[in-house]
Image (cartoon, rainbow, N blue to C red):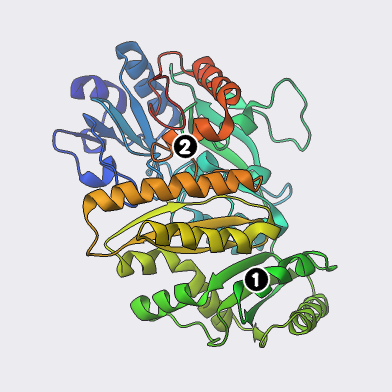
Amino acid sequence: MKEALLSIIKDENRIITGPIDPQYLSDNLGRKKGTAEAVVFPVSTEEISGVMRYAWKNNLPVTPRGAGTNLVGSTVPSGHGIVLDVSLMNHVLELDEETFTATVEPGVVLEDFQAYVESKGLFYPPDPGEKKATIGGNISTNAGGMRAVRYGLTRDFVRCIEAVLPDGEIVQFSSNVVKNTTGYDIKDLVIGSEGTLCILTEVTLKLMPAPKFTRTLVMPFENLESCIDMVPRLLQMAAVPTAIEFLERELIDIVERNLHKLLPVKEGDAVLIVMYDAGSEQELLSACTEASDAALEAGAIDVYIADTPERIASVWSVRGAILEGMKAESVAQEECDVVVPRAKIAEYVRLAKGIGAKYGIRVEPCGHAGDGNIHTEMLRDASMSDEDWIKGTRACLTELYGVSKQFGGQLSGEHGIGNGRLEYLKPFVGDRMYKLYQSIKLAFDEKLILNPGKIITFEE
């Protein structure tokens, strides 16, 4: 295989064969380990096309990979195939300040891209919790994040995509225009497909003018129910919040205890963290005043206003450190990121904790109160056996997804299915929808070589 790959990549430093570093064989939580015969690091669309033509001809599985920050096994390879790592394709190819667009390669890291466009007075709103993920990974999972309340998901900012199909053909999905009803919208189908349909090689993203003023409010409440009840009031106001996050005190304590990041509010069993952006200081002041008055009227213990970059950063650093804090708190983790109607958040959290207690597993939910996307974290104590942990988390996930479905929710809000949620998808969506998923996969990849074993399977 190495000689064949060298004829395509033509740089042995960008090809790994033999013993492969475990980081390329797992996801960010390290729960599942995969196998592969080679890892390649292409630097162009043409090299990716060549690798895929070779894999197609020889029926070799190919697993695309960016930063490897996924949490559901989307980048875990299988078989004696190839891991195709796009991390060297990390360039901003064009920034068009007149049309507010940027064309980038898939390996561009989100936080680097956001810093770059902000230095130009522009703004890329998608803001998932993992800032070191790549743009390609964000698109592959249709990442949302905290600012989705006001600005939407990654999908809302993708104008066009260049990609390589499983047989190596290079294609363009859509074009850099605002409207398009030319046939089926394949671009939106590719977004969120977790690398199972094609490999992204170039994307054009929509940008916005950077907001000039921002403030964050922290609203502590006596309990979660009162906290969540505040959310619809915020969304009915004239100024739409940029982000609305909820945290229970237990999670804040985990972050403070393990990572020494301190939230400047010590009261309350639950808090809302609310962000506002505005084009003028007066507009921002008006929004924050209305929200603060409403929160106090609704029973908030107080409202803390973070009005400097340092204070704002200190608040959001606690929210951003949740995953890291729980890694430090437990010997293993499992997670689901269901979506439920906002009115059902408090009830879901209460049921989730009861389900965890039934199986001896500590459950800590948090998440995006503005859109009902709840990250339900399960933590393993050191005293729990491997068998009890595996059985317990599987039973928890089954019940949690059942509650989400009962509430009219969804199985995943932004992490996707990968190979860690395979067994739960078909019961959730039903036979007819699952067959449609299979048909779409076969239309792109009849040999089933691209990121096999992710999202769907063809096994009875």
Q: Residue at x 61, y 83 (%)?
A: 308
Tell me: 359 left or right of 99.
left
Q: Quadrant of the C terminus?
A: top left
Tell me: 151 left or right of 254.
right
Q: Residue at x 83, y 68 (%)?
A: 237
Return the x and y of residue 444 as percentages of the image width and height.
51, 18
Q: Residue furthest right?
A: 238
Return the x and y of residue 242 as percentages of the image width and height.
69, 64
Residue bearing mark 1 = 225
Q: Residue at x 60, y 25 (%)?
A: 433
Residue bearing mark 2 = 424
Q: Quadrant of residue 286?
A: bottom right
Q: Is residue 1 above or below residue 406?
A: above
Q: Is residue 129 something that shows in the picture?
A: no
Q: Residue furthest left?
A: 18
Q: Nearer the viewer, residue 204 or 183?
A: 183
- The three-letter amino acid code for the residue at tag 2 is Tyr
